[in-house]
């Protein structure tokens, strides 16, 4: 069984569109994350949720809005997509919000904005 | 703000040689230092970690050392193999925030 899953795996869209990426974990973890990995491979935290509550919100444009309907799901909605949003987006989860816990990553979603 | 510097950004070694990747952190409160490996096109995965009350930890061919005074920690891979080729990320964790380094692309030449 896949521990952390994301859909879609690939997403190609035009500038200005709105798109969503979904993430689900079946590990029973309390904490979930969204990371952005750009072309230089930098792995940057965007958001973190613990039990559906936002606990980390890095400097991310308002066009990005995470939503956690329950602690097993953390979706990412992006409005008015820009060229610079092209990247691989990774979802991750950990047992709780302590930084000591291993983070389990999803397979990534490669977003290409044309 | 807190940051983690990682060097080198790319590293090429011959199979069988050793590889060392170094990280420096700025947050004095950091006390957890994991290393993640990301193979090409795959997800990052934890390979080893160390806490601040330990100076060194080893797991088969990989080891991590920590110098808390200097705020340095390093990943050592001995007897490198082609399957070690990947991007490696160090991390620095304090309380409930983990910051990743900028990554090192390791290429092991057969």
Image: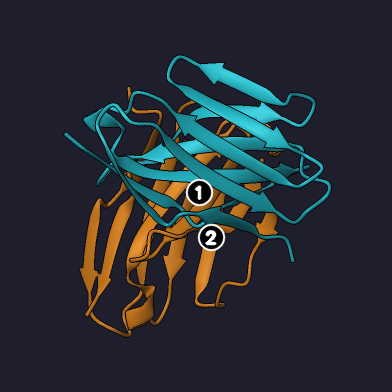
Chain colours: A orange, B cyan
Q: What is the chain letter for disc 2?
A: A
Locate the C terminus of chain A by quadrant.
bottom left
Disc 2 is placed on an element classified as strand
Direction from residue B88 to residue A59 in the image, left or right: right
Horizontal side of B5 relative to A11 (left or right) equals right
Percent coordinates x, y for residue B24 in the rendering = 65, 51
Q: Is residue A72 visible?
A: no
Q: Residue at x 21, y 68 (%)?
A: A12
Pick out the residue farthest to the top.
B60
**Quarter of the rendering containing residue B57:** top right
Mark 2 = which residue? A66
The percent position of residue A70, horizontal first and vertical second, equals 57, 42
Label 2 to label 1, Cα distance in Å?
A: 7 Å
Q: Secondary structure at mark 1?
A: strand
- When asked about the image quadrant of residue B42, the answer is top left
Residue hosting label 1: A74
| Residue B8 in the image, given as x and y percentages of width and height | 46, 54
* Residue at x-position 42% and y-position 77%: A79
């Amino acid at each position: 069984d896949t521990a952390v899953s994301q859909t879609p795996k690939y997403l190609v869209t035009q500038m200005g569109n709105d798109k969503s990426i979904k993430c689900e974990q079946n590990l029973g973890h309390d904490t979930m994350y969204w990371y952005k990995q750009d072309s230089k491979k930098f792995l940057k935290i965007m958001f973190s949720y613990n039990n559906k509550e936002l606990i980390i919100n890095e400097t991310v444009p308002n066009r990005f809005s995470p939503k956690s309907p329950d602690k097993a799901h953390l979706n990412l909605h992006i409005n008015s997509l820009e060229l610079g949003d092209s990247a691989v987006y990774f979802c991750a989860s950990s047992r709780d919000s302590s930084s000591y816990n291993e983070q389990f990553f999803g397979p990534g979603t490669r977003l290409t904005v044309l | 703000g807190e940051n983690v510097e990682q060097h080198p950004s790319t590293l090429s070694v011959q199979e069988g040689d050793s590889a060392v990747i170094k990280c420096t952190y700025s947050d004095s409160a950091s006390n957890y230092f994991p290393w993640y490996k990301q193979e090409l096109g795959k997800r990052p995965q934890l390979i080893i970690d160390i806490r601040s009350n330990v100076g060194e930890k080893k797991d088969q061919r990989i080891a991590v050392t920590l110098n808390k005074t200097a705020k340095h920690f390093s990943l050592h891979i001995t007897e490198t193999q082609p399957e070690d080729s990947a991007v490696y990320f160090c991390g620095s964790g304090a309380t409930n925030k983990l910051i990743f380094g900028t990554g090192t692309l390791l290429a092991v030449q057969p």
